[in-house]
Structure formats: C-alpha cells, structure tokens
Image (cartoon, rainbow, N blue to C red):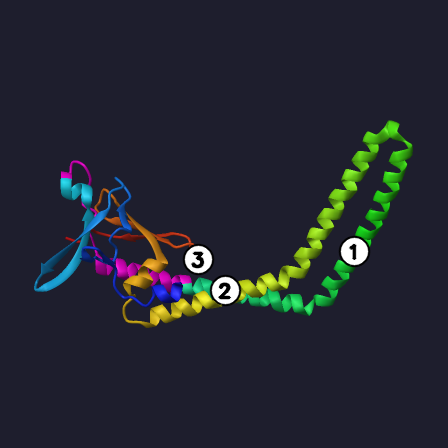
Amino acid sequence: AVIESRKSNAVRTKGGLVHRYSGMIKCADCGAILIAKRRKWNGEEYVEYTCNSHHRYGKQYCSPHRIHESQLDELVNAELLLLLDSIREESQKYDRIVREWQKNKPRYEQRIEQYNDRIKLLREQVQSILMERITDKAHAQIYDEMLAKREAEIADLENRIEDTRRFDAVSMGRSRELKGTAEMLEDILTEPHISNADLRMLVEKVLVHQNEDKSLDVELVFNGAFAPSCTVSIEEEQE
C-alpha cells in the first residue's frame, strides 16, 4: 500500500489539482485551515498559506499566519533528515541487542531451564495442596490462597520464558522494520523534491502559531510509523 501510494506525484480532488499542504495545514490559534494562494513578487510566482479566519473575517478575528510553501518544504526536509539519523541510531541499538542476546544465548537458555524447574516444583505443590484441601475442608480458604499464590507465580514464570524466547526475534523484527523505514526515507530524500504523495504519507498535519512579534511556530506532526511531532520557529512573517 505504501509503495502504491508513492507512485503518484500529485494530489487531486474532483475539482482538480490541489496544493501540497491543503487540508493538512491548520491555524494553531483559531483552528481554521490555512488556505493557499498563488502570488507573484518581482516576477517570481510562489504559493502562500494564510489563516482562513483572517482571510474571511479580518485581523480582529485572527492573525494572518502567512507562510510560504517553500518554507514548509524546507522545514519538512530538515526534520526528515534528523528523523533519518534518529532511526539509524535506533536500528543500530537493536542490532547491538541482538548480538548481545546471541552472545549470551547459553545463559538465557540456562535461565529458561531454571524457570521450568521452578514451574515443575510449583505444580507438584499445587497437587499436594489440592489433596490436603480435600481432606481439610474447614481450612479451604487458606488452601485457596496458597493455590492462588502458586498459580500466579507459575503464570509469571511462563511469561518470562516466553519473553526470553521471543526477545531476539522481536529485536530482530524491530531492527528490520527500522532499516526498512530508513531505506524508504533515504530514497525519498535523494529526490530533489519530496513528492506530494510522499509528503502526505509522512506528514499527518501542520499546525502554525503566530506570536505577538509576528514570528511563527510551526509544529509538524508526522504519521505514527515515522516520528512524534516536532516544533520549529520562523523568526519573522513573510510578506
């Protein structure tokens, strides 16, 4: 599904082509969407996003929150480079975990054997307690408490055995997943321009807050598989 979604370089609606950040960029102050406008300055054409509340109702309702599409692209690209470094580092951490597990595998197997021996002893105690409870019904509650304690310990030991056995497999799976994500990001970032399809696969939403000095704080919220949100600042509003 991810591969298929990356085939298209355009985002379209029934009305035709839409701008790159349409629908995902919002005003962090009033909650309205930021609408895109094509503008020209000194013969250069660019796309600018502004708060729809300011556009419709004026400055008394909300500030403009003006930001250029090129600025957003630069911010996304910069954050994806940081994300890629973070993913590579985490992948290497899981590689070290797997190597350490393989190195100490005999010790982990010995631990599992100890757990199994303890479980065997506890099951024998359970059988003995059950027999005693049958002949001593007057103290059934005490026996029930003894049984519950041992059954809880058995369940805990069984979980530990499962976790120990699955630890290397889970770590290897996580390492492969991270490497796959890193390779995808590397592929995306080698292109001179992030496609619309890749942008929407990576970024869930963009929130823009305008400060009193007209500088902007831009929060990029990435889709779950990629990263938590991050906030960056733009010193002054672009006219």
In percent of the image, x 81 and y 37: which residue is there? Answer: 146
| Amino acid of disc 1 | Asn
Q: Quadrant of residue 210?
A: top left
| Amino acid of disc 2 | Glu
Badge 2: few (under 14), some or many (20 or more) residues near its Cα, within 10 Å? Answer: some
Compared to 102, does 149 lie above or below?
above
Give the SS element for disc 2. helix
Report the Cα–Cα distance between label 1 and label 3: 38 Å
Looking at the rendered structure, which numbered label has been put on residue 60?
none
> Which region of the structure is painted magenta?
57-83
> Does residue 58 show up?
no
In percent of the image, x 41 and y 65: which residue is there? Answer: 84
**Circle 3 residue:** 225
**Circle 2 residue:** 177
59 left or right of 75? left
Badge 3: few (under 14), some or many (20 or more) residues near its Cα, within 10 Å? Answer: few
Compared to 103, does 69 lie above or below?
above
Report the Cα–Cα distance between label 1 and label 2: 32 Å
Could you tell me residue 145's position as x and y percent?
A: 79, 35
Looking at the picture, tell me which residue is in the foreground, 153 or 123: 123
195 left or right of 167? left
In percent of the image, x 86 and y 44: which residue is there? Answer: 127
Which numbered disc flags the more N-terminal residue, 1 or 3? Answer: 1
Q: Quadrant of residue 170?
A: bottom right
Looking at the rendered structure, which numbered label has been put on residue 116?
1
Residue 90, magenta (yes or no): no
> Does residue 117 show up?
yes
Q: Quadrant of residue 129?
A: top right
Could you tell me residue 116's position as x and y percent?
A: 78, 55
